[in-house]
Amino acid sequence: MRKNEIFTETIERICEGKIINKGNEIFFSHFCNDTREIKKGDIFISIKPENGTDGTKYIIEAFEKGATGCLTEYELSEEIKQKYREKTIIKVKNSIKAIQDLAEYKRSLYNIPVIGITGSVGKTTTKEMIGAVLSKKYKTAKNRGNYNNHIGVPLTILDWEDDIEAAIVEMGMNHLGEIRELTNIAKPTIAVITNVGTAHIGFLGSRENILKAKLEILEGLPKEGKVIINNDNDMLNKAEIKYEKITYGIETESMYNAQEIFIDEESTEYVTEIEGKKYKIFIPASGKHFVWNSMCAIVVGKILNVEFGKMIEALSNFENTGKRIEIKEINNIKMISDYYNANYDSVKAALEVLDKITAKRKVAILGDMRELGEYEEELHRNVGKEIIKNKIDVLITVGDLAKYVSKEAEELGLKQTYKFNTNEECIKELNNIIKKEDAILIKASKAMHFEKIAESIEEAGMYE
């Protein structure tokens, strides 16, 4: 039996379910929980909507689009069961628990290196860089997009092909216990922790608790497992880790260090020494964070015996498909868009990118950072300090919390600041603020919908 083919009876047993319709399929190799992405032959995972609406309509939609099976908590009507009697229907108590159990079972079938990645920022880019490096030697699987939670990780593993030789599993969280659940499903052989910052500190209460949550990834490691950490991170470099620990860094002396760093608006270069030989690394993207991310990929590649020349080639041709920061020239300005998420560390990194852009003026349009709890004023004010540090000329803020960024920057001497309550207010005044040859950073949490601001700039005419 192929590892990516799971028999109907095996699904029933692993999920502690009951076959309602036997259907025509003997086994399934692809699982999907989104009817927009369903393909012929899939087994559809029917997850009850949190708003309590009846989700049976999605089962019907999945069947109509070609799904040949369904895993569901719903009691389906006789009419539906008869109409789709050629489809396999398995009733389970909890669909999410069922796919987690299935993923844990499927993971047990593979004796391959699995790299688990967590961290406050940089997870996705690090995942993509490790994937680029490992793909030079191994057939490598990794999460699609942001499939890094209690549903995405199981679906990632259930997507593994029979012949993969290495896998990368990104793990996200915003509460204690979530990484523990994911690592015990994925069972990584190598654990990567990119950093411990302030993301989700409102939920976790302190950076100490964030560290505790990230270290849960170690609970899935075997005794011979390895842990790779960013040694420049103040929380990680003093954390007690009982596994073999491998460190990389820039400022802090580590097992692998980056030196002679040069960053411009389009690329990042540095030198690293491995086994007494120096290697020059080129990344076709701008930002200090790419140094850390690529160093981590090099460490993973070395552990898994990828040739150095091939690693350098992979990084020099790196295309960050999971990128958050997008830089483009439009309407005689340069626009840096990054509105997927926002926490202090990611805003700081984005401002450092803006600092490297060649322009007459540097303009930052910033919105509220969410999930910060009692730290919200302090961390927004810290961003204000970064505004000054990175020599930003014009600051535009949107939202109640972002006003603290403006207040701090104004207190530190910034003259040109604009504060708005809503995106609409901001958009209305942008043409009076933006000038030709500006470089503009647009950065906020996803919930702020800053794509509307970006769209308004793209739709505008040439700036004066």
Image (tube, rainbow, N blue to C red):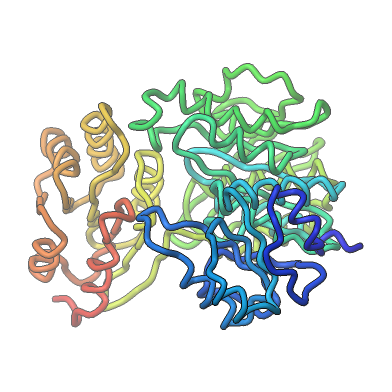
Q: Residue at x 24, y 29 (%)?
A: 378
- Residue 104, quarter of picture: top right
Side of 272 relative to 224 (left or right): left
Side of 158 relative to 302 (left or right): left
The foreground one among 142 and 68 is 68
The foreground one among 432 and 90 is 90
- Residue 277, quarter of picture: top right
x and y, in percent, of residue 145 in the image: 54, 60
x and y, in percent, of residue 200 in the image: 39, 36
The foreground one among 336 and 123 is 123
Q: Residue furthest right?
A: 1
The quarter of the image holding the N terminus is bottom right
Side of 444 relative to 430 (left or right): right
Side of 291 relative to 10 (left or right): left
Task: Give the tally of numbered discs.
Answer: 0
x and y, in percent, of residue 447 in the image: 29, 54
The quarter of the image holding the C terminus is bottom left
Q: Residue at x 18, y 82 (%)?
A: 461
x and y, in percent, of residue 90 in the image: 67, 61
Q: Residue at x 9, y 62 (%)?
A: 425
- Residue 375, quarter of picture: top left
Compared to residue 286, the image places residue 452 above or below, namely below
